[in-house]
Amino acid sequence: MTASVKAAVSATEVGNAARLPGVWRLGLARGGVEVKQFFRDKMAVAFIFGLPPILLVLLGSIFGSQAAAQHVTVGQLYTAGMIAGGIMATSFQYLAISIATEREDGMLKRLRGTPMPGAAYFAGKVVQVIMCTAAETVLLIAVGMAFYHLHLPSSPGRWWTFAWVFVLGTAACSLLGIAASSLPRSAASAAPVISLPFTVLQFISGIYVPFNDVPGWMRDVASFFPLKWMAQGMRSVFLPQQAAALEPARAWEHGRIALVLVIWIAAGLVLCLRTFRWQSRS
Amino acid sequence: MDNGAAVAVRDLRRSYRDVVAVDGIHLDIASGEVFALLGPNGAGKTTTVEILEGFRRRDGGTVAVLGHDPARASRAWRARIGIVLQLASKGPELTVLEMVRHFAQFYPRPRAPEEAIDLVGLTAKARSRVGKLSGGQVRRLDVALGIVGQPELLFLDEPTTGFDPEARRQFWELIRRLRGDGTTILLTTHYLDEAEALADRIAVIAAGRIVASGEPGSLGGRATAAARVSWQARDAGPTTVQTATPTRLVAELAREFGGEIPGLTVTRPTLEDIYLELIAEVGHDGER
């Protein structure tokens, strides 16, 4: 090849590469399709998006008027915990089930066979999770305010706590969800394989029952996972300061919450990088 | 490097643990050609195609697809190929048009989504949810997704499985049309009539090797193979003779009968006969 031909060839290749659509644009396009699919999927809307508010209304109506302590109702405890549970449902549970389904029914492989960059796929999931998790959180806060004497954070400090618990919790649960998507071996088994342990985790993390009513050894197990700490963080945002005395450590432990969530983000990232596959094993 | 070849494969090898799936395959597909890869299940067909598509790694050999090594697939390379996967999918919660439009966004120079849908004959279903389509319609959508990027090279893995005869004929027309536009096509199929109708060249793969390749009419010595002449003999009833000189035999019979020969047929081996013979030979080798 002469130098001029080489230059012409590389110019063409650069020209082609330049015309490939950008990663950000494709990430947004993926996000739009993800959101559209989620809200058209009645199963996803009912069991992932709808279940936390429904459970909050049920549990809150049955137990909500009881006083957990001075200044705190059980309804407030449930709402704060369910906000954490809702974050994990729309991030961990949704991602694990949807990615497992897409892997097993071949959608991931099909996308991999196109010029779509892998990053655009994950950007789409991020858009979907942020929109869905934010909507879920707003809905749960609205239900709590309407029925269970929940109050919006009363100081900038509490809003700041809310923001970092929300962001770190969503990130940790999302990464765990992507990693957990490798566990189901078929599209049909994805929902039960993911939802069963998630339900157990919500019980032992004090989402469906006040954390103080959970047996000690279960609380110890729950302390290894992010959900217990997210719920604790949300209680520190929405409950009166005196309620800190109800916590196992008699304090909100913000430093420890942040530490646990950051460790889970790091572990989740490593797990994702090591285990993510675009194709089913079969 | 590519000499106008769309696909150039030399001594391709791939094993899974102790099982040798691909055992030294050579393959050349010219630009603009429709090439059919035939072979029984487990012959190494899928492994070979998936290596060419950049989905699987190889143990040895060299592979160039459109001049690039698929093991290092770039986005620019992916934009030049199209893959029609045969997948069981309950279908996402999107309409046909939304899905094709979405996939078109990935490519630098896509076809109009409506055009891709029209080419596969799904225009009437463009606004139906993918989950509501019949099996054959989903397969046509698969094809639309494979061609929406205007690929130079199209991989078709058993594209007409589950099609009714009319849909198959329509699909064949589509393939001829794409070929007419200069698209190179690598087709795998179980249907020998399909390979014969569409392919410029055929390769038969068995036990991880190419056991024969050539044009459909001459594959495996088909053009020069003995013809089979059958007729109703006066005394013996149905009679069949294999002969290298069928014309002479028919002329003799015509003299003998003094005109029409009852029940006369003259056949060369069909592609299916040749194929089954090739596969059987490999099977015996394997047993020995």
Image (cartoon, coloured by chain):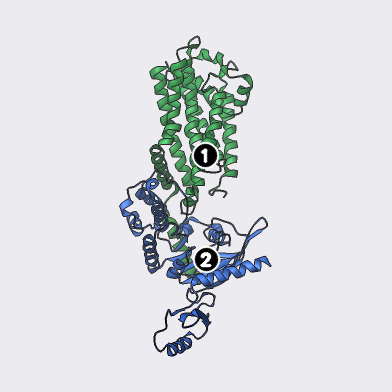
Chain colours: A green, B blue
Query: Residue A31: horizontal and vertical position, in percent?
Result: 42, 42
In depth, the one of B9 and B43 nearer the eye is B43
| Chain letter of disc 1 in the image | A
Residue placed under numbered mark 2 in the picture: B38
Q: Are marks 2 and 1 on the same chain?
A: no
Residue drawn at the location 56% of the way across and 64% of the way down: B63
Residue drawn at the location 52% of the way across and 83% of the way down: B243
Secondary structure of residue under mark 2: strand
In depth, the one of A123 and B113 nearer the eye is B113
Q: CA distance from mark 2 to mark 1?
A: 35 Å
Relative side of B93 to A243, left or right: left
Q: Residue furthest front?
A: B235
Task: Say which quarter of the image contains residue B27.
Answer: bottom right
Asked if one can make out residue A154 in the rendered structure from this viewpoint, the answer is no
Q: Is residue A275 above or below residue B67?
A: above
Query: Residue A95: horizontal and vertical position, in percent?
Result: 49, 38
Residue type, label 1: Ala
The total number of labels drawn is: 2
Secondary structure of residue under mark 1: helix
| Chain letter of disc 2 in the image | B
- Marking on residue A190: 1
- Marking on residue A81: none
The reply to whether callout 2 and callout 1 are in contact (CB within 8 Å) is no
Q: Is residue B130 above or below residue A53?
A: below
Q: Is residue B272 above or below residue B89?
A: below
Residue type, label 2: Leu
Query: Residue A190: horizontal and vertical position, in percent?
Result: 52, 39
Asked if one can make out residue B25 in the rendered structure from this viewpoint, the answer is yes
Query: Residue A211: horizontal and vertical position, in percent?
Result: 56, 19
In depth, the one of B18 and A125 nearer the eye is B18
Relative side of B77 to A249, left or right: left
